[in-house]
Amino acid sequence: MAAKTKIAEKKAVQNIPSNSVLKIGNKTFTFTQEEKISYILLALLLFLVVFIRVNFLNIPYERDEGGYSYYGKLLLEGKIPYKDFYEQKLPGIFYFYAFMVSIFGSTVKGMHLGFIYLNVASILFIYFAVKRLFSPGAAIVSATTFALVSLTPNLSGFTIQGEHGVAFFTSMGIYLYAVATQTKKWYWYFIFGLSLGTAFMIKTTGLFMMFWGGVILITDFIFTKERNFKEFFKNLFLYGAGASSIIIILLLIIYMKGAFNDMIFWVYDIPKYYVNRIPLEEGMKYFDYSKDAIVQNYKFLWIHGCLAVLLCITKSVNFKTKCFVISLAVLSFMTIVPGYYFYGHYWIQTIPGLSVLSGITFFYILIILKNQFKLTSPNVTYVYLAIFTVFTLFHLSKLKNYYFSPNYESILRTVYGNNPFPETMAIADYINSIAKPEDQLAVFGSEPELFIYTNKKSPTRHVFFSTIVASIPEHKKFQREFASDIEKAKPKYFVFYRHSVSLLVQANVDQYVFEWANKFINANYKLIGLVDMVDGQRSTYIFDESAQKYQPKSQNFIMIFERKS
């Protein structure tokens, strides 16, 4: 049976006649019927993706989106990471967002448009990777899986989170792996490493996919009969050189800007206090909650993808493919594990792997049908594609309100609870209506998206307030830096988030910054706006003099102050 399966793997798509020819110049391109159908479906899929995603062009940011966009903007203005703004991420994410801002602008609409292009490119990389490795039918199944799962609301699919960048470079890496192993050109191995090394520099969890690239090259060599040791070591070296080159280049840039020691402090020293904060038992509860929320309306796509692992374990599949499937599944999953937080947007990093696995499920189920059930007609492929399409259309119909008529506030409440994300955009609209371009703005809370909405700069390097009230030894110093920066700037407007999640105050931290804020605001500012955020109800907005008489009903509210004359 194993021999028959291997033969079938090689001949899986050869029984479909080549009946379509395209000539471009002196080149002739021949397409099978399956290829033609898959290209038609791909075109329809891309149109659908763009049609859906433009409905989310103006959805408000959550705080990470706002922060990364803001850092990208600062970088383009010549600011130095870890010196002019503080963040606990590797520098790749700043340069990635700076690139996106430079092309599409820093507005909400512009950045969402940019990430539509990013998503479409990821889908194309997945399609052509799976087409090269398996079949056109498998490719369209993989592309559809990526397109739909990457839109999952509880996975923050509608956002511009940094994990979408990781997914893009991972998808590119998988495609480059397919090209490199088929063409045997040395430069493809280098670019393969470069792509997955970039994924790591955007988010540290991309390390697992960078590791996968090395693992798959080694296992391919082990399970290849005709082994060329010289070529193997050359290709492995080229892959490693590509991956390390982007790391070295970015670290060298930081070093030349004189911020290397600052980077070590923020990227290594500070995060040490967060490691192992959540015990495994509690982390498993987070995983279950996150998994259920993400998978609930996408079960067919997740089950179809994960079925590839079961097929490779239980069926007579060659060891090379087994290693490809299992390593891709395990290391994709590992991207969400560190820290045991299992935040929804972490799962974006698993989508390239899941999508490829979904195509493999399609590919091997067809082989099983042909081998064990003697269903050798090409029509079996089209019936399978038709069934998959029906499930896709049913899914779209079930979530039509989310896809085609999204209610921004409802979506943000469902995904992020009572976080003040819709309110922050409304506050920005109010400030923009009364502020002058030269007026400065300070924010007491972790809502850097407000600086993007108002096109203003933070007077302090501590854009995320949660860092200065965290249980780390330096937090007392950070609080005093925060207060000093704002006192020097004398901002015209001061927005105070009296909100537990935006402040995220940890136990047993210094209360200096709150005592300072109370004195500083009372002495220099007057209340001109208040947003009352009652759980389960629409927020109440009170502006101008009426705000001074209003008594908040909720424990979570936001105050907007204007400096006294």
Image (spheres, rainbow, N blue to C red):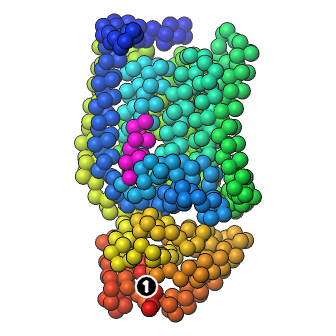
Nearer to me, 373 or 239? 239
Residue extent of the magenta highlight:
110-121
Q: Where is residue 54 in the image (x, y as percent from the top left)?
A: 31, 48
- Name the residue located 62 percent from the left edge and 45 percent from the top edge: 201
Nearer to me, 92 or 213? 92
- Name the residue located 59 percent from the left edge and 53 percent from the top edge: 340
- Is 173 covered by the magenta stretch? no
- As drawn, is 318 to the left or to the right of 299? right
Under circle 1, the secondary element is strand
- Name the residue located 52 percent from the left edge and 52 percent from the top edge: 98
Q: Where does the C terminus fall, quadrant-wise?
A: bottom left
Name which residue type carries label 1.
Answer: Glu
Most common secondary structure along the magenta stretch: helix
Q: How crowded is mark 1: few (under 14 residues within 10 Å), some or many (20 or more)?
A: many
Q: Where is residue 222 in the image (x, y as percent from the top left)?
A: 68, 18
In this view, 474 is above or below 348: below
- Is 120 covered by the magenta stretch? yes
In this view, 456 is above or below 390: below
Is there any visible trace of residue 393 in the rendered image? Answer: yes
**Pointer 1 residue:** 562
- As drawn, is 487 to the left or to the right of 428? right
- Name the residue located 34 percent from the left edge and 16 percent from the top edge: 34
Nearer to me, 67 or 370? 67
